[in-house]
Amino acid sequence: MTTQLWALHQKIETRLAGATGAEMHVAVQLWSEQAELTPDAEHWLFTGDSAEVTRISCRMSSGSEMWVVGGPGLGVKLTAAVDRGNNAGSWSRALRLRRRWREGAVVSTAMEAAEGKGRHNSNTAGLALLPAELLLEIVSWLHPPAPVAHRAHIDALDSRAAELTSIQAFCALSRTSRRLRQFFLPYAWRQIVVYAPNNGGPLSRPLAQRLATELIEKLETVVIRNKALAAHVSSMDVTIGDYCEDKVLREFMRSLSCLSNLTSLCVSTTPRRDYVGTRSKDPFEAASAYKFPSIRRLTIAHVAITLAWSCPNLRKLTISSSVLPQSDTFGSLSFASLAPLAKSTPHLRSLFCVSISLQTESRTRANKFPGLPPALEEFGLITIGRAGVDPTLLKRIADHPSMRRIHFRKDSAFEWLAPGRIDTEAAVLRKAGRYVQENMMMKPGVDAADVYVTLRPASDRGTSQSKFYEFDSGGKDWVRVEQLKEFEH
């Protein structure tokens, strides 16, 4: 380090933490007016032991990342976690240090506060003065509305735009003042959302690259740059394309293992058109090296089924593709792929797929159907076609000891039930509903009020014309309802 005079600008934000309030976390962004202190000196994080910092002097050894910070009653050694080229954002207080270096030691240090000198001061009026109760009310209004119960991410419901708008609002509020940053920043990182606006269609290479870059940047923020934020992440909804797929998925899985409070995960895969059908291996194989015990709700495409096997405490699994008895096509999932769930997810209580085929003409035998997870209470969506449903397989599902709720989906060739219809199609629908309901009710210790059988359209887009049915045990028929019940798992 030379003996020239360095003019360093520091933007500092502090917040008290801990039960005693004596610990201060200070995020510092450093840069030099004349030259860089080190090749990587950009972003620093350190901890002090005093809430009143009246004077700061620094000594840096040449080529080192170890600083000694001193002041009245303050002595701290810190190791810098350096992250090059990242803007720390908006800060409420600026300090200027002028220092002369001579043989690695500080000869003189002067510090002047930025208050009253044209720089940004702490926000002491307006929104920042509102009590916590009113700020919580603002939070409730900024949160996106909960999805309608019957949708449950079936048919690729896209509520991500509202979630992203909410996140952006929290980020904007967190930049207005120190107090609001403390209050709103955790809400801004409760959800991580990365999605393609044309969800469900093929991704262009530039779009796939943008999604991959955005995902990695957000993961680095909570896992590397600001680890304190990782504890606030409870939900993720991301789209992964084929751009650098292996590298992105490895980093994605490693980052998931660092998010100890993540309970809900939705992973969509939308490969490019010329990539469909060319996969030669399991793209989510990297998940097998990790366990994600905190994840309770998982929504995935069929190509990501391996991820479910690494979630031992999973409660609800939604697979956004069809399940067929025997399938080797790109767009569907076979029963054999579900078999590991019985052992790897012993606490699974709800299993949804966009369509499960149990039709008689499939010639599927009961011994080919995989064992169900021991705690499974809810299963669907079983497609009912003109040929009906294989009664052997249907009985095996209904007889599962913990099974209480079975959901059907009408084949697209069916017309909707009308009052008094007695034709073959209506009879097939009634027979399926009555069959599973009676088999579930006959099991020992089952309360009839817990048994729930539903029927929905072939394509549930959540429109106002959608019709939903519950099976009525008294009338032995389907009864139309405005909305299906939702159960917490």
Image (cartoon, rainbow, N blue to C red):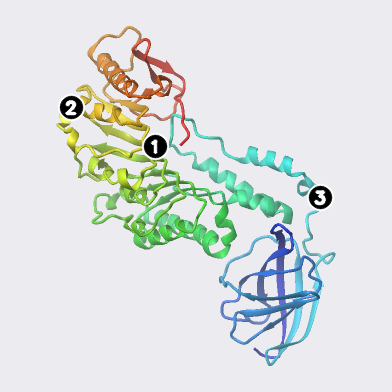
Q: Give the mark nearer the N terminus: 1 vs 2.
A: 1
- Look at the picture and state if 404 lies above or below 273: above
- Amino acid type, mark 1: Arg
Q: How far apart are marks 2 and 3 (CA)?
A: 70 Å
Q: Residues within 10 Å of mark 2 (few under 14, many from 20)?
A: some
Look at 25% across and 30% down and name the residue there.
396
The x, y position of residue 207, in whole percent, is 42, 54
Disc number for residue 125? 3
Marks 3 and 1 close (CB-CB < 8 Å): no
Q: Mark 2 points at which residue?
A: 360
109 vs 204, left or right, is right
Look at 40% across and 60% down and name the residue there.
248
| Foreground residue among 328 and 390 | 390
Residue farthest bottom in this picture: 103
The x, y position of residue 487, in whole percent, is 46, 31
Which part of the image, by quadrant, shows the N terminus?
bottom right
Q: Name the residue under label 1.
A: 349
- Amino acid type, mark 2: Thr
- Look at the picture and state if 208 lies above or below 162: below
The x, y position of residue 93, in whole percent, is 76, 64
Q: Give the mark nearer the N terminus: 3 vs 1.
A: 3
Q: What element carries label 3?
A: loop
Look at 60% across and 50% down and name the residue there.
188
- Amino acid type, mark 3: Ala
174 vs 420, left or right, is right
Q: How far apart are marks 1 and 2 (CA)?
A: 27 Å
